[in-house]
């Protein structure tokens, strides 16, 4: 159910909410139009949102389309995920400089923005929680992720539309966001219903033009119920992780290896994939070197390169590694599935490989 | 692409390591990438002795080289002996660009009879002395490292020099271009616009030049390792490309790379 402490905010008030966040020192980032897609970038005003736009997504295809209304959030997730802010694609961890008789180490910049994420969908809230387990839980905390994560202000948006590639309902990760946000907006035709998820979320609303909600709460509930009914894709995870462990030699791996480009796109758009490489980057004069961390991928043969060669020498081995990790061994490693059902890997695979189909095919002829 | 383990340059010795830059059949674009370094050129000159580089200095060819950078393909009869001579003078031989590593764009003539090509291009073909095909340096001599690109990326060249000068074994990234598109927040032009992009089968290194401008990749850095060209070609067919269009895409800068050669043949 929708939080009963919810309030109603006129759509025109969203700009004031954004301005308030900037005034409080946040860097507000959220959906905007660029390069023919809805991507995440800095938002100074509400009219930078893709108002009146939607997306049509299919395996291997994404197209922007005009809506026949002026909805602010009438689209599903795009190619970017919030990990680009919490786990930057390229980060200088530290640098080393030669001194007269030794060397000096300089830490990378600790001056990171205080982000306010505007428009976080339920699947992505779950994805952030999955990456929290990777970077924050357990004995080794990643200080770079921690610094960004603990300062981030999260404004969720309840999904009013599902793409054909969405399958969060079957992953129990959406479409309704129930926790992990400071504020959550549900877009109704004339206004937003705003749920308060934290003290600082409530504090942000003080002074903004909001009023108590009445019938709007039920209307907001219906928004995500409708979205849930729109969702056609499902992933049956009832027999994970055993299903994949028991089918490591299934013929389907050869079949998908014939289609997979091993191009890394699925892992790059995945909001939970965390693989990275760390390289030493020396300067020409031999005076300075930077240690740089970059996103990397299990589909890059170099990632598993050890003395003697790659441990995953062909595409079959790499696809199997990705899917079994994402859906099976992730559970053993972190206690949850690595998949949140956002569907990005399906849309942004250049040849439209659909993991839900791959799993169904393996299940269909289990132990074949 | 590193053919054998390299011993490293002894970096802090005097005199500085000697660098030679050699040109074969080419457009000079790769050599220009070195001159283009501008800001870094003084640092390069500080760390290595630029002992032979016709495009930059009048110094005559003499002695041996710690590192030789070879641009261009072997295309004329006298170049066969020249490339062997460069090899004999060099500790490390690094080829620059598509021509030196795979014959380059001029290797398109390898698909036809050279006399036919000469008659089309030259007014007096009888004055031209040429080999029947345009061939990579590695057809003649051992190559230690091939830097891809048409032209090469100067950052990649500087990175290789910096790695060698700091005592490391030079390596370059060769994963699919897509990885760098995503690291740089570039939206996929194939998925979002239906543009026939070769990025998924192309080695990185260009800095995502074309996709950054909403243009599909033409693979001027050549095939990535184990490129699944057949699956990508099938996708191109599905978005409406003709067999001839697909063949031409694979017959460009890296037309002699075995993976592209084979894929192009499937669409003849």
Image: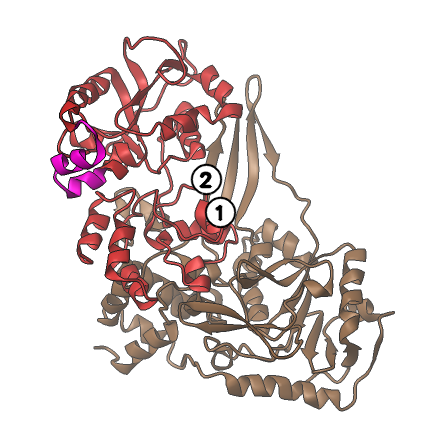
* Chain containing mark 1: A
Depth check, front residue: B238 or B109:
B109
Q: Residue under circle 1?
A: A294
Q: Residue furthest front?
A: B123
**Apparent side of residue B94 relative to residue A157 in the rendered image (left or right):** left
Residue A230 position within the rendered picture, expressed as x and y whole percent measured from the top left: 51, 85
Q: Quick check: B51 above or below A91? A: above
Q: Residue under circle 2?
A: A279
Residue B144 position within the rendered picture, expressed as x and y whole percent measured from the top left: 26, 29
Provide the letter of the chain coloured brown. Answer: A
Other-residue count near label 2 (Cα within 10 Å), few / some / many at <14 / 14–19 / ≥20 = few
**Visible residue check, residue A338:** no
Q: How many marks?
A: 2
**Region rendered in magenta:** B107-124
Provide the letter of the chain coloured red. Answer: B
Q: Residue at x 26, y 52 (%)?
A: B248
Location of the N terminus of chain A by quadrant is bottom right
Q: Residue at x 27, y 34 (%)?
A: B99
Q: Could you tell which of marks 2 and 1 lies nearer the N-terminus?
A: 2
């Amino acid at each position: 159910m929708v939080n009963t402490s919810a309030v109603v905010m006129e759509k025109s008030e969203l700009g004031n909410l954004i301005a308030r966040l900037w005034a409080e020192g946040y860097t507000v980032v959220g959906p905007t139009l660029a390069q023919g897609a809805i991507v995440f970038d800095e938002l100074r005003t509400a009219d930078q949102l893709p108002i009146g736009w939607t997306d049509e997504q299919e395996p291997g295809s994404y197209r922007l389309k005009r809506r026949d209304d002026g909805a602010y959030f009438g689209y599903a997730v795009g190619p970017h995920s919030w990990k680009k802010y919490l786990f930057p694609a390229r980060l200088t961890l530290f640098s080393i400089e030669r001194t007269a008789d030794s060397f000096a180490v300089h830490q990378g910049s600790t001056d990171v923005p205080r982000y306010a994420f505007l428009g976080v969908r339920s699947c992505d809230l779950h994805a952030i929680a999955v990456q929290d387990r990777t970077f924050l839980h357990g004995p080794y905390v990643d200080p770079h992720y921690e610094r960004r994560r603990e300062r981030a202000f999260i404004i969720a948006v309840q999904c009013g539309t599902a793409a054909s590639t969405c399958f969060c309902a079957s992953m129990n990760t959406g479409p309704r966001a129930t926790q992990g946000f400071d504020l959550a907006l549900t877009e109704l035709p004339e206004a937003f219903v705003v749920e308060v998820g934290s003290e600082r979320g409530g504090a942000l609303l003080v002074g903004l033009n909001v009023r108590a909600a009445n019938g709007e709460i039920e209307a907001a509930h219906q928004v995500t119920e409708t979205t849930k009914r729109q969702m056609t894709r499902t992933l049956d995870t009832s027999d994970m992780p055993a299903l994949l462990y028991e089918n490591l030699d299934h013929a389907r791996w050869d079949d998908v290896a014939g289609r997979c480009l091993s191009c890394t796109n699925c892992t790059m758009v995945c909001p939970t994939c965390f693989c990275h490489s760390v390289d030493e980057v020396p300067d020409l004069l031999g005076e300075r070197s930077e240690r740089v961390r970059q996103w990397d991928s299990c589909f890059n043969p170099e990632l598993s390169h050890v003395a003697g060669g790659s441990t995953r020498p062909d595409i079959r081995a790499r696809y199997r590694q990705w899917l079994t990790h994402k859906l099976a061994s992730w559970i053993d490693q972190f206690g949850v599935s690595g998949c949140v059902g956002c569907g990005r890997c399906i849309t942004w695979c250049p040849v439209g490989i659909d993991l839900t189909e791959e799993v169904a095919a393996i299940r269909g002829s289990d132990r074949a | 692409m590193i053919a054998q383990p390299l011993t490293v340059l002894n970096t802090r010795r005097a005199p500085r390591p000697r660098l030679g830059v050699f040109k074969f059949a080419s457009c000079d674009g790769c050599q220009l990438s070195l001159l283009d370094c501008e800001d870094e050129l003084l640092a390069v000159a500080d760390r290595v002795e630029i002992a032979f580089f016709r495009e930059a200095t009048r110094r005559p060819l003499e002695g041996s080289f710690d590192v030789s950078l070879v641009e261009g393909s072997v295309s004329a009869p006298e170049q066969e002996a020249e490339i062997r001579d460069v090899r004999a003078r060099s500790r490390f031989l690094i080829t620059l660009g598509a021509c030196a590593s795979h014959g380059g764009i001029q290797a398109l003539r390898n698909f036809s009879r050279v006399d036919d090509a000469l008659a089309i291009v030259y007014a007096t073909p009888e004055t031209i002395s040429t080999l029947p095909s345009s061939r990579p340096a590695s057809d003649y001599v051992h190559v230690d490292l091939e830097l891809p690109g048409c032209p090469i990326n100067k950052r990649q060249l500087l990175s290789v020099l910096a790695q060698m000068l700091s005592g490391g074994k030079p390596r370059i990234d060769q994963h699919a271009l897509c990885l760098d598109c995503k690291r740089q927040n570039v939206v996929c032009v194939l998925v979002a616009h239906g543009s026939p992009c070769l990025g998924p089968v192309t080695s990185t290194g260009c800095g995502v030049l074309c996709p950054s401008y909403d243009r599909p990749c033409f693979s001027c850095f050549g095939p990535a390792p184990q490129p699944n060209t057949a699956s990508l070609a099938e996708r191109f067919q599905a978005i409406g490309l003709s067999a001839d269009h697909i063949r031409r895409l694979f017959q460009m800068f890296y037309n002699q790379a075995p993976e592209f050669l084979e894929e192009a043949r499937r669409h003849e």
